[in-house]
């Protein structure tokens, strides 16, 4: 018992010394992403969207939120796709970055599947992202209810690291703060699109897509988007 108490005392003392003499953490003022989304990404054209009142209400005031609705141009519904992309960059308050599963649940979505997917970039690098299959009921104009399915794909970006897992993000923050003297200013990109194979074309305004086709479309958009705003994926200048 005395030995354990002595070891605990020594560990506490070492922790206090490290806190006292460690240099101030760096890197927290600069995010690992640009605070913008490109207007054109592959075959998609993006239109700026404003953050919702709810987003502004729930997130700290110094949070940066960038949003675009990406559409494939064309008059024919059979060839039209739509996806919503957003980029949230933390300010001084770490509450800006959190597990999106919490917000989706609060918006009435049920998560039916969660898995990590790999995006093969043109540079040869691989970006790992998390794909959430989500579902909720919608009321059509004729009064009938229909299950609305969608895929919500996201990942976390630090100063020079990225991860699709929130626990890994927290561990990276702790590790790099202690071992690398880096304080990550985390960002959280996401892309969301509906599955439309059960929706009337006049209701969705998009081509009919299965789950697999919707995921393929989202990953293709991310393949074009990510190297345009994520700094560690940008080609050297």
Image (cartoon, helix red, strand yellow):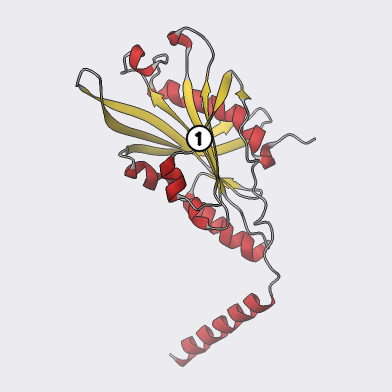
Q: Is residue 127 left or right of residue 79?
A: right
Query: Toward the viewer: 110 or 124?
Result: 110
In the image, is residue 184 above or below residue 133?
below
Residue 125 appears in the figure:
no
Which quadrant of the rendered structure holds the C terminus?
A: top right
* Residue 41, horizontal then vertical, whole percent: 61, 24
Q: Which residue is mark 1?
A: 50
Q: Quadrant of residue 133?
A: top left
Which quadrant of the rendered structure holds the N terminus?
A: bottom left
What residue is rendered at 63% in x and 29% in y?
Answer: 38
In the image, is residue 87 above or below residue 13?
above
- Residue at disc 1, secondary structure: loop
* Residue 70, horizontal then vertical, whole percent: 53, 24
What residue is rendered at 61% in x and 49% in y?
Answer: 158
* Residue 105, horizontal then vertical, whole percent: 33, 43
Residue 69 appears in the figure:
yes
In the image, is residue 167 above or below residue 232?
below
In the image, is residue 90 above or below residue 83?
below
Crowd class of label 1 (few under 14; some 14 to 19; many from 20; radius 10 Å):
few
* Residue 108, horizontal then vertical, whole percent: 30, 39
Query: Toward the viewer: 195 or 164?
Result: 195
What residue is rendered at 38% in x and 29% in y?
Answer: 150
């Amino acid at each position: 018992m005395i030995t354990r108490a002595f070891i605990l005392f020594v560990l506490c003392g070492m922790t206090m010394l490290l806190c006292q003499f460690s240099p101030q953490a760096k890197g927290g003022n600069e995010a690992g992403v640009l605070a913008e989304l490109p207007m054109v990404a592959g075959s998609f054209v993006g239109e700026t969207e404003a953050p919702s009142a709810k987003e502004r209400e729930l997130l700290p005031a110094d949070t940066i939120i960038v949003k675009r609705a990406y559409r494939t141009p064309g008059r024919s519904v059979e060839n039209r796709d739509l996806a919503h992309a957003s980029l949230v960059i933390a300010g001084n308050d770490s509450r800006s970055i959190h597990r999106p599963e919490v917000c989706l649940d609060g918006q009435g979505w049920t998560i039916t599947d969660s898995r990590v997917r790999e995006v093969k970039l043109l540079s040869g690098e691989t970006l790992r992202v998390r794909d959430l299959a989500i579902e909720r009921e919608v009321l059509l104009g004729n009064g009938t209810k229909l299950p609305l399915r969608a895929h919500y794909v996201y990942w976390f970006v630090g100063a020079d690291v990225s991860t699709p897992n929130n626990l890994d993000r927290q561990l990276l923050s702790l590790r790099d703060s202690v071992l690398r003297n880096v304080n990550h200013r985390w960002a959280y990109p996401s892309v969301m699109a509906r599955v439309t194979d059960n929706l009337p074309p006049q209701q969705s305004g998009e081509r009919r897509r299965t789950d697999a086709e919707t995921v393929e479309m989202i990953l293709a958009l991310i393949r074009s988007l990510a190297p345009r705003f994520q700094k560690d994926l940008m080609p050297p200048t």
